[in-house]
Image (cartoon, rainbow, N blue to C red):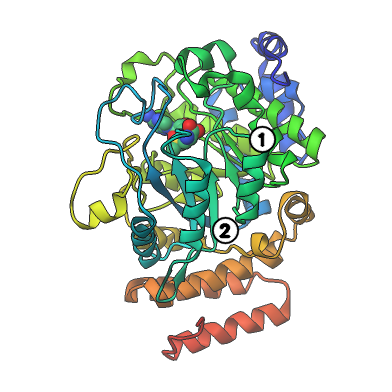
Amino acid sequence: MFIDHEYIEGLLRDAAHASKEEIQSVLDKSRAGERLTHKDVAILLQIADPEQQHQLYQIAGEIKQRIYGNRIVVFAPLYISDYCVNNCTYCGYKRDNEFVRRKLTMAEIQEEVRLLEKMGHKRLALEVGEDPVNCPIEYVLDAIDAIYGTQNENGAIRRINVNVAATTVENYQKLLEKKIGTYILFQETYHKPTYEAVHPKSLKGDYDYHTTAFDRAMEAGIEDVGGGVLFGLYDWKFEILGLMLHNEHLEERFGVGFHTISVPRIKKAAGMELSAFDHLIDDETFKKIVTIIRVAVPFTGIILSTRESAEMRRELIKQGVSQISAGSCTGVGGYKEEEMKGDSVVQFDVADHRSPLEVLKELVDDGLIPSYCTACYRSGRTGDRFMRLAKSGQIHNVCTPNALMTLMEFMLDYGDRELLEKGEACIQAEIGKIERRDIQQLLTDKLDRIRQGERDLFV
Ligand code: SAM
């Protein structure tokens, strides 16, 4: 197994008493853009001095800026089934929790999608519990067809990332045929004894099968995979090294590592108390986690969900996060329920309850460009072809103009006067930074037409 526990524990033991000088030399290395070794990352995990911590945040911010610029990708989760045969100790959908389970019909899925489209969403993360009988792969495949086939005025979902439990190569091939975006699966914890303890007597409890899921997904031809750790289950230092080893294993075997890494922290959920978890992460440690991941794997996107507060999200976007969810519901049928002021059973509590429009206004205020772009995936720029683009530094000339176009589209279709005004200023500033004259011109023309009151530029 590529998550060698003894090796990780040895790295942590050796680094435990790293001196300030040793930590400084790793900080200098990452500032210079050098690739960090396992030993380097283990040393960085020991950072405690406030001044060095400040340096770490700065370096992470510089890397974020250099590679991703001001773009921030926005998406929403869509829960379609809460049937689950697993009994994960941390999860509100565990089988021991008694509530009336449901899965949406195709018509109900389309209703949810229309509501998401009305908010301006173009990217979804499709979420289901694990239940081979009530939620078989065929149901997920039909749901994907239903989602891609649902149009609401100007709205359409252009990329569906899928979070289904670890499965077979054949099932991953079926998902690939449906043109999914990233296949997402959180490891939860890389520490095998903890993994087995928090997933008692269940399908998900097979550590090796779960940990090799991306191998099967990539064997099936899926090129973009998104990992993650549920922080709070075990020692965060062990988990970060676990992420590194997993990423490297995929790089060695398939030529490309994680497309994204998610960093959920455990939240209160039905049938569990946070006090039962010994490794909960405080805010300062959480910032360290995100920034260390940023410097350790600069080209991997980092996803931050609405589990985190608006303030935490605002801060971490500057220091490494490249994708956020917005306006999220974590219950089946939750978007309709919310419209009707009802209560759906949620998987866990969220902290940022703002609508996408409100989130976008703050992003634009902060000089960031919310992006709904899905061009990479639609033009086959996935896996190592995306990584080549990222590593070449050309993201700015490709992704920034695309992001600006999607911001203009959002402003026209879903924005109000305030967003239009804020957005215009933000776009104007960004156009000035684009190197290619022809692209500058194209964007300037579009912006002028918006200013003149044209409202159908993107039909
Ligand atoms: N069936 C998939 C699976 O088991 O991997 C679905 C995953 S679930 C919809 C998405 C993620 O939410 C889980 O992988 C877990 O990390 C996270 N999650 C579950 N309970 C949570 C809680 N109480 N707080 C925060 N995140 C939680």
Where is the N terminus found, in terms of image quarters?
A: top right
Circle 1 packing at 10 Å, graded few (<14), some (14-19), many (20+), is many
Label 1, label 2: how far apart the Cα atoms are:
30 Å
Task: Give the residue displayed 63% in from the left and 65% down from the top.
Answer: 375
Query: Whereabouts is ligand 1, in terms of quadrant?
Result: top left
Q: Is residue 445 visible?
A: yes
Q: Is 17 above or below relative to 51?
A: above
Give the residue number, with chain letter if any, for mark 1.
214
Q: Is 445 placed above or below 55 here?
A: below
Mark 1 or mark 2: name the one nearer the start of the chain: 2
Q: Nearer the viewer, residue 158 or 141?
A: 141
Tell whether 268 sits left or right of 204: left
Residue 193 picture location, percent across and down = 55, 10
Q: Amino acid at mark 1?
A: Phe
Q: Which residue is rendered at x = 49% and y = 75% of the image?
A: 408
Q: Which residue is mark 2?
A: 70
- Residue 30 drawn at (x, y percent): 72, 36
